[in-house]
Amino acid sequence: MAEEVKLFKTWSTPFGLRVVWALKLKGIQYDAIDEDLSNKSALLLQYNPVYKKVPVLVHNGKPISESLVILEYIDETWKQNPILPQDPLEKARERFWAKFNDEKLLPSIWGVFTKEGKEREEAIADSLENLKFVEEELTGKKFFGGEKIGLADLVFGWLAYLICVFEEVTGLKIIDERFPLLLAWIQEFSELPIIKDNFPPHDKLIIKYQAFYEKYHPAK
Amino acid sequence: MNINLDFNYKSIKPFIFICFHFGILALVFSLIVHRLSQTRKDALIGSLSLITIRLTVDARPTATLIEFSNMEEVKLIGMWLSPYSYRVIWALKLKGIAYEYIEEDLSNKSPLLLHSNPVQKKIPVLIHGGKPICESSVILEYIEEIWPQNSLLPSDPYERAIARFWIKFADDKSPSISNIYRTSGEEQEKAVKDSLEMLKTIEEHGLVGEKKFFGGDKISMVDMAFGAVAHWLGVIEDVAGLKIFEQHKFPRLNSWIQNFKEVPIIKENLPDRDKMLALLKRRREMLLASE
């Protein structure tokens, strides 16, 4: 039976992009369906009735939702170029940092982008603390996965192309010279063809996030 | 009749030699095993069965590391009131893994906790052979890999993806349940609304198909991830003086709760209801007073 792989995403979602990177790393052919989240397709709602979100991977008609769950599925189904290590302790480490990004780092930085006044100050403090932990994790390593990129790199990958957009739109420096390892990682990660060839277009991102920013900080 | 004994004796001499020395080795081995603690004996049996499984089923290069690592010491830093802590206890006990339990006072965090989980400073933390693993769902996956007996995840990748989806859902939505007793007014209304939505989703999407447990006939880590719904929700309803889970509205969930709590390992390992009620009531009073 021919393998049929579809990926529901949007042009800009970092959660969808991490799945794109995984599929490309393993050389898996797939159909990309870019959704308009203000007008979700019937198929998306059918495939992800619980969250109604992207990304959704559909493999031979069977849907999988939640990007981290999708990444684990991809790694277990297509064994070439693994994104998770064999050793259980190392696997646990990668999973821990993936969760940390999604549950702590990303929300704190998003808080810096969306909040104002005292709440923004708190978000900045949280982000700095979270970034410090991530910086430490890179000690002695080229990538979070060691010599090669792995799950954690794909999950932290949004930092490589979206932080500069946030910084440009807000006028705030988020990852500065206090984080030399993180800056070096961003360089290395961004130089990988599979990664940078799939970055969403910078100009389009600026327009999108500029609009978001104005929504969260209406001119008084 | 002349029986040629000389020839027979010579050919079996090496055989007798080997048997004799094998016998000595077996005697020494059994003396050593006899002197091992029960913990080590269990671990040894687990290890030997694992070696058998690995040799016959799986030839991954790191198999050797895993075979012997499952004999190393296991500690769990937990907290008696936390459903996340219990997820790990249930998993360890279901797999027959001996471990040392360390109760943590979260108002006065121990150096061990801060050293083992410097990033989150939270429980549960599993410490295996001195190495810490944090985050309950990450710990459960780790336990499943090191000790594959009494499997807590399906083997098919798609079924595993479904299981992991529901575990993530439980992780995302369970905090609404504790928010019911932590808040009042509008915030509490939101917590109640979110909790009801969670229950509705489980009823309509998670437990479809007359299944005894989320994964079918056997308990799995998905059931453990929803432990808060099975036991903690009832107590929290009493603390807040609210009725949220109405049995007739959630028939599948109701059956699942009965099935879950009847599993001996679960039944024997739940925090005492009265103790929970007393502590959560006190906590609620303190939280509301400070507002």
Image (tube, rainbow, N blue to C red):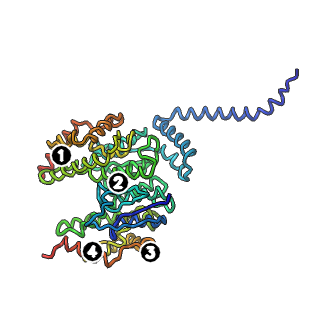
Q: Position of residue B161 (x, y in %)?
A: 40, 53
Tell me the subunit letter for badge 3: A
Local SS, label 2: loop
Residue B280 in view here: no
Q: Amino acid at mark 1?
A: Arg
The image's mark for residue B283 is: 1
Tell me the subunit letter for badge 4: A
Q: Decide which of B39, B221 is in the foreground and name it.
A: B221
Q: Amino acid at mark 4?
A: Lys
Q: Position of residue A118 (x, y in %)?
A: 17, 67
Circle 1 packing at 10 Å, graded few (<14), some (14-19), many (20+), is some
Provide the residue designation for mark 3. A191
Q: Quadrant of the N terminus of chain B?
A: top right
Classify residue B51 as left or right of residue B197: right
Provide the residue designation for mark 2. B117
Local SS, label 3: helix
Q: Nearer the viewer, mark 3 or mark 1?
A: 3
Q: Position of residue A102 (x, y in %)?
A: 32, 61
Q: Amino acid at mark 3?
A: Glu
**Residue at far top of view:** B1
Q: Decide which of B183, A44 is in the foreground and name it.
A: A44
Circle 4 packing at 10 Å, graded few (<14), some (14-19), many (20+), is few
Q: For the residues marked 2 and 3, what is the alpha-carbon distance in whole angstroms? A: 33 Å
The image's mark for residue A208 is: 4
Circle 3 packing at 10 Å, graded few (<14), some (14-19), many (20+), is few
**Residue at far bottom of view:** A203
Query: What is the quadrant of residue A210 in the picture?
Result: bottom left
Local SS, label 4: helix
Nearer-N-terminus badge (2/1): 2
Q: For the residues marked 3 and 1, what is the alpha-carbon distance in whole angstroms? A: 52 Å
Q: Decide which of A82, A153 is in the foreground and name it.
A: A82
With respect to residue A5, does A211 lie above or below?
below
